């Protein structure tokens, strides 16, 4: 199960890179001048930075087998998931958050990223608890 969690995490990462590329190429950084933005820069960049950090901790768990690495990766992934959920709800919402480069995100990519992320979250939790044994 830890390898399947890694695969789900990597899938989420690759689709996330694509979404970040779409956001940046659509003028995401240039459109941050307004006071009310859908995706603040700190949110946009802390989500992937923490995800890569957690992925590194997960790799340490895979190589050493020490369960505390799995729990540390799960903790980091929990923060990543909360940030991702924040972006997802802002992406779904309209109103005062109607402007931004994220309007052009393909629904399929957002869905795939979210499903892969949730799958990785559940699989990492199961592996950390030792349930697959």
Image: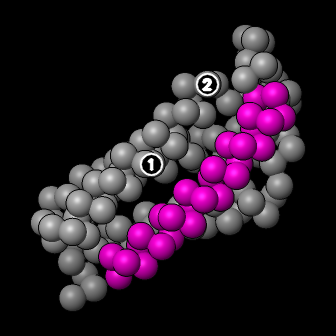
Image location (x, y in percent) of residue 89: 68, 44
Along the viewing direction, whichever of 121 and 32 lies nearer the viewer:
32
Instruction: Please tell me whether mark 1 sits on a helix, a strand or a loop.
Output: helix
Asked if residue 53 lies in the magenta stretch, the reply is: no
Name the residue that disc number 1 marks. 51
Image location (x, y in percent) of residue 9: 48, 64
Query: Which residue is drawn at the image coordinates 51% and 43% (left, top)?
Result: 48
Q: In this view, does 124 lie to the left or right of 105?
A: left
Specify the label residue 41 is tagged with.
2
Distance from label 1 to label 2 (Cα)?
A: 16 Å
Predominant SS of the magenta segment: helix
Image location (x, y in percent) of residue 2: 33, 76
Residue 72 position (above or below residue 111): above
Query: Which residue is drawn at the image coordinates 35% and 82% (left, top)?
Result: 1
Residue 35 position (above or below residue 66): above
Give the mark, 1 or 2, whose residue is nearer the N terminus: 2
Q: Do the residues labelled 1 and 2 touch (CB within 8 Å)?
A: no
């Amino acid at each position: 199960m830890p390898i399947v969690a890694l695969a789900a995490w990597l899938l989420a990462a690759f689709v996330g890179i694509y979404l970040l590329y779409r956001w940046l190429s659509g003028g995401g950084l240039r459109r941050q001048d307004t006071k009310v933005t859908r995706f603040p820069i700190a949110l946009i960049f802390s989500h992937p930075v923490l995800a890569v950090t957690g992925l590194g901790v997960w790799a340490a768990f895979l190589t050493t087998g020490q369960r505390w690495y799995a729990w540390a990766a799960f903790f980091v992934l929990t923060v990543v998931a909360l940030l991702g959920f924040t972006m997802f709800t802002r992406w779904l919402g309209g109103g005062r958050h109607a402007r931004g480069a994220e309007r052009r995100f393909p629904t399929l990519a957002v869905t795939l990223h979210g499903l892969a992320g949730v799958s990785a979250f559940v699989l990492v939790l199961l592996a950390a608890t030792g349930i697959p044994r």
